[in-house]
Amino acid sequence: TVDDDDKTGKLLNAQGRVITASFPCFIVVGAYVPTTTFSNHPKFKERSALRAHFDSLMAPHLRRLALRSEVVFLGDMNVTMTHDDTYANIPGLLDDFPSCRPSERRRFKQLLHDAKLTDVFAVFPTPDDRRPTWFRTSRQRRRGRGLRLDMVFATQGLLTKNTEVRVAALRHH
């Protein structure tokens, strides 16, 4: 069932960016998180404010859900957790790139920390370190040059019940 029994859940679901579904042993939250843009773009402030507002709504929503049940939070997060999630893998190189700004990363990491969610790929690395990546051109994507924006997070109770993660397909809409 779609779980939108609280005001925040209803607002997030109404925006078409979040679907919260309850199952007997856990809750799944699927999200398409708003992205920001380049700092010289005319809509930079508007997009940054939208992202910050979204994060401010999502954090308490995830915290409330985690009090009720185990939680899986997955989707297009539109932020890289660290420089390791970028094709460049060089600290500081992409700091003004959308989805790579230190301020976006800090806010998103705080959201995860507050909800007690852990990056599944950090706990269960894939044998060949395959992770979903995205880049504007398919040629770069095929080379594995992209950003890891599609992520899966889970509460500790679910992590202790699983032993591996498999990436079946490396496609991004």
Image: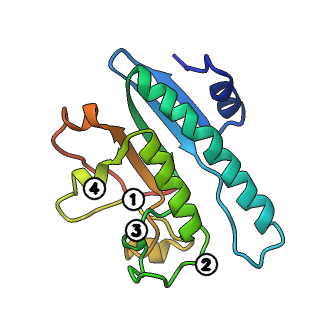
**Regarding mark 2 in the picture, which secondary structure is present there?**
loop
Q: CA distance from mark 3 to mark 2?
A: 15 Å
Q: Is residue 22 above or below residue 19?
A: above
74 left or right, relative to 13:
left
Q: Which residue is mark 3?
A: 85
**Secondary element at tag 4:** helix
- Find the distance from the CA under tag 2 to the CA under tag 1: 22 Å
**Of callouts 4 and 3, which one flags the residue occurring earlier in the amino acid sequence?**
3
Amino acid carrying mark 4 in the image: Ala
Mark 1 crowdedness (10 Å alpha carbons): few <14, some 14-19, many ≥20: many
Apparent side of residue 130 relative to residue 15 in the rendered image (left or right): left
Marks 3 & 2, CB-CB < 8 Å contact: no
CA distance separating discs 1 and 4:
13 Å
Q: How many marks?
A: 4
Residue 99 visible:
no
- Is the Cβ of the residue at disc 4 closer than 8 Å to that at disc 2? no
Sequence-first disc among 3 and 1? 3
Q: CA distance from mark 4 to mark 2?
A: 25 Å
Q: Residue at x 41, y 68 (%)?
A: 82
Closer to us: 170 or 163: 163
Q: Nearer the viewer, residue 59 or 36?
A: 59
Residue 117: horizontal and vertical position, in percent?
38, 42
Query: CA–CA distance between discs 3 and 1?
Result: 10 Å
Q: Which residue is mark 1?
A: 132
